[in-house]
Amino acid sequence: MSSLLGARRDPRMARAGAVVLGIGLAIMPFVVGAGAGTAWVRVLDFALLYIMLALGLNIVVGFAGLLDLGYIAFYAVGAYLYALLSSPHLAVAFPALAPGLHWPVWVILPLGALVAGTFGVILGAPTLRLRGDYLAIVTLGFGEIIRIFMNNLNRPVNLTNGPQGITQIDPISIGGVSLGRSVEVAGFVIPSVYLYYYLFLIATLAVVFVSIRLEDSRIGRAWVAIREDEIAAKSCGINTRNIKLLAFAMGASFGGVAGGLFAGFQQFVSPESFTLLESIMVLCMVVLGGMGHIPGVIFGGILLTVLPEALRYGAVPVQTALFGKVLIPPESLRMLLFGLALILVMLYRPAGLWPSATRKRELAVAREAAEGRSE
Amino acid sequence: MSDVLLAASGIGKRFGGVQALQNVSLTIRRGEIYGLIGPNGAGKTTFFNVLTGLYAADAGEVILDGTRLNIGVPHEVTQQGIARTFQNIRLFGNMTALENVMVGRHLRSRAGVIGAVLRTAATRAEEAAITDRAHRLLQYVGVESRANDLARNLSYGEQRRLEIARALATEPRLLALDEPAAGMNATETAGLRLLIESIRADGVTLLLIEHDVKLVMGLCDRVAVLEYGEKIAEDVPEVVQRDPKVIEAYLGGAID
């Protein structure tokens, strides 16, 4: 487990690289907004949310090797928690609470992490003895259970407003400044999506930081040991039950934070945002990017958020230019290409598009061995 | 301090209709190399798995240095001072050799999530101590030059040694080796023998399952023989070798 970029480089170079990266990230929304329109800044915002989700799932799947197909449930828990604690909705069920709860975001987000983490433990506990396919099936079921609860908890007490979802959620506001409206700074108007970009960027950097620190620690090593060989890990003195639950809790808490940010950003949540397909999407980000490798997972998150959007905008004009009409609707094309990309990656880059340095070294060794044999 | 490090008494283990172990009792003395031999299927590895916590025994108990072992809970058994290696090497293949040994330090260190994220002074000191200790253990077993290679890329003999280093990292009082010489050539076996002797010299008691009878008889202070899940002999090698029941178990009895 090495540093972020796999190899330790000259510290001066590394610092210069960090400064360039920082400036790049800071001016990104303005460049993208000016070049491609505000809609694309919104895509960037979502990319950041998905990076957080992918990094959370990476702890469970990438580090600890526990295949979780219901991860989006924790995103849902975080989102609904924010929605309930920061909208007029609770007053519907409990008139005493009128005009609803409007808690500040810095209370809700840590609470969201905590509640989602607790759900992680609750859903993880029954699966401790399961591995591989069986674990995947059970977690898939749990993910669906949470969504179906959200869908039906409008009776007997209207907690989630059922399939209609919760509306009128307060936009996130920090220090009295609402991110839901554009802000004017020195005659310079910064639109709402730009503000969210910076908030999400800070949250994502925090999640990346926590991930890196955990990976290179006693806990991170224990996770990887369990992934590699659970029985050996046990006999090395690792309490696999607790360490696995910790992985579920940490992964879920990232999801909870991302969910809260999502609810504040959209100002609307409904069960439709938390389907199985979303879980699979996040899993694909982890697997395509490079399981267990933080930069790879970030790359996967960006790629799988931006590419489908690019297809959505690009598919129609390109097809009209080529064939004079739209042969395949963009929605189907997206899935088609997506499936193809997945198959190709699994065939030719089984360790992901950007695997970790150790994995790369290992592949190189294998290749040399193969070449040595063929000569 | 009594002379006896480990006392197993009346251990029984049944898998469905097969009585894998029946009333097996044995004592291992402090500082000795104890061998456990027997024909294939005699229950050696089952006994090993009971002792190191992987299986819960149906009957009997194990006392290690005066305290009852929590059989069936491997990490607690390791905590109490028994470490093991596996017959078919079980390393963490995609971790480096160094990291493998560092995992062995898990239960002798304590950094949690908060310490890891904030990287406090205490955590940094602990990590440095873990790394240092791991390097010394790699040196001890002689695979220091491969510290940064993935465990799966090590040679067979190196993997065996690495597994021993990982077990030693847990600071065991009893180190249990399941067929450590399996698949080794004569030179590797000789090297292994030196390693086992130096581990004993450093104050760790050893329990050895081995097929290589020459190695066992030359190395062990005392030997127990299992057959069909029962102990048929336990004594110094010279006596065990001449025991008619042992000879019968290995070579078959006379036909009447």
Image (cartoon, rainbow, N blue to C red):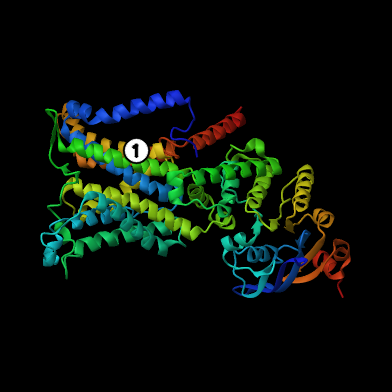
The residue under the point 49% across, 37% down is A2
Among the 4 quarters of the image, the one containing residue B154: top right
| Apparent side of residue B12 relative to residue A164 in the rendered image (left or right) | right
Badge 1 local density, few (<14 within 10 Å), some, or many (20+)?
few
Q: Quadrant of the N terminus of chain B?
A: bottom right
The residue under the point 69% across, 69% down is B66
Residue A362: percent from the left, percent from the top?
54, 36
Q: Dot 1 lies on which element?
A: helix
How many numbered discs sit on the rendered protein? 1
Location of mark 1 (residue):
A341
* Residue B94 seen anywhere in this rendered image of the structure: no
Q: Disc 1 residue type?
A: Ala
The residue under the point 21% across, 40% down is A196
Residue B216: percent from the left, percent from the top?
80, 56
> The residue marked by circle 1 belongs to what chain?
A
Q: Quadrant of the C terminus of chain B?
A: bottom right
B118 vs A228, nearest the viewer: B118
